Image (tube, rainbow, N blue to C red):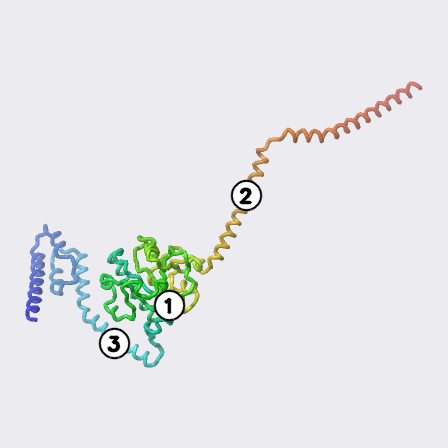
Amino acid sequence: MAMVATANEEESQNLSNSNSTVLVDCSETQPNDSEDVQKSTLQNYRGKSMDELNQLLQCNSISKNQKKKIMKQIKWNERIEDRRLHRKQQKKDRKEKARLLNKVGTKQRLNKVTTTENFDKLVHVAIDCKYDHLMSDQDLTKLGKQVAWCYKVNRRCEHPVQYHLCGLSQNLRSHLDPTHGNWDVHYHDSLESTTTDQSNLVYLTAESDYVLEKLDPGLVYIIGGLVDHNHQKGYCHQLAEKQQIKTARLPLSENVDMKTRRVLTVNHVFEILVAFRSTQDWKSAILKVLPTKKLTNDATIGKNERRRRKLAAMRENDAKENKSCEVENTTQDDLTQEPDIEDCLKQSDSNEPSSQTNVSSDSTVDVSAADSNTDCNNSSAER
């Protein structure tokens, strides 16, 4: 302990000496060296004491903007004790409020349900965590948060499932909560160790041709613990087929219309399964879990209804296009079509009888006129 104390004292002395040298340099600098001073000394004010900040304010090479920042940090340091007392009082108030609420009974805490009871009667959900070699450190952190969220949901739901973690490596364990060893979870080295019969395993993948209709007790539904941002497309499905494990997919397209791809996160798949256990309705479970940004405006309409509406709209458009094409064709035919010789001959044949009748009538009129003229001439001659 004495050696540790002496080491800390030496470090503090070195820090104070370094700060003092920096401050001395700031006070003794020439106007030509002002840029170098600002780069070396005016980087961060949060780690400096009040004396150091006051000395920096007296430096002539500091700009007005830097002085404002120093004054702001001085005011912040002056209120450190007040903030600490305020947080302490808030913590006491929260504890007192929680104690009163629990005593009166107006607000009850959620009862945690252990998943180790009735192992054979409940549904089993396992997360396959053997893909850490395909993920970056940031993706492993995201997977650890999703695994912890699934555990929280399962502990608070009305109908919990048997929660299994398979192939959990030491690298992924470092990204989990430090208390994960005390979780009410079944840990396994591989998927095969979750059940004695491999036919009870069902791997949930988006590429599967089989639609999951219900959750049967005794089966282990596996979720691929892979956060790859769609870089490894169909990897879990291919691996399941190689291991001869049955695959299935959630009935997403049969119940809702999604804007994005049907590949969901680990916690979304787990929450949908748990929600279906309580509602026994896929549509309500999916709409309860998925965020609205993944769904279209008519997401609540079923797949068959959307198909009917789409076909009806296509038929209406086809009918309108056909009508417009017919109208255009008729107008173009009337404008561009030349008269036929046969049609002209038919029209001339049909017009010939009328012309003959006209001629005959004209001739009769002329004859009668001629007869009348001859009669008149004869009468005049007799006279």
Q: Position of residue 250 (x, y in %)?
A: 40, 60
Q: Position of residue 267 (x, y in %)?
A: 33, 63
Q: Which image quadrant for residue 25? A: bottom left
Q: What's the distance in space between the residues labelled 2 and 3, CA to CA?
A: 78 Å
Q: Which image quadrant for residue 2? A: bottom left
Q: Could you say whether the residue bearing mark 1 is in a helix, strand or loop?
A: loop
Looking at this rendering, what residue extends furthest in the top direction? 381
Q: Earlier in the sequence, mark 1 or mark 2?
A: 1
Instruction: Please indicate whether residue 231 sits to the left or right of residue 346 in the image.
Output: left
Q: Check disc 3 and report the residue beneath it.
A: 92
User: 121 above or below 198?
Assistant: below
Which is in the foreground here, disc 1 or disc 3?
A: 1
Seen at 25% across and 76% down, the residue is 92
Give whichever of 200, 34 is nearer the camera: 200
Q: Dot 2, crowdedness within 10 Å: few (<14), some or many (≥20)?
A: few
Looking at this rendering, what residue extends furthest in the front direction? 197
Q: What's the distance in space between the residues labelled 1 and 2, CA to CA?
A: 62 Å
Instruction: Please indicate whether residue 61 sits to the left or right of residue 172 in the image.
Output: left
Give whichever of 223, 196 is nearer the camera: 196
Give whichever of 224, 374 is nearer the camera: 224
Q: What's the distance in space between the residues labelled 1 and 3, CA to CA?
A: 48 Å
Instruction: Please indicate whether residue 51 sits to the left or right of residue 275 in the image.
Output: left
Q: Position of residue 313 (x, y in %)?
A: 51, 51
Q: Dot 1, crowdedness within 10 Å: few (<14), some or many (≥20)?
A: some
* Circles 1 and 2 in contact, beta carbons < 8 Å: no
Q: Which image quadrant for residue 148? A: bottom left
Asked whether residue 233 appears in the rendered view, the answer is yes
Q: Check disc 2 and report the residue beneath it.
A: 324
Residue 218's label in the rendered image is 1
Q: Earlier in the sequence, mark 1 or mark 3?
A: 3
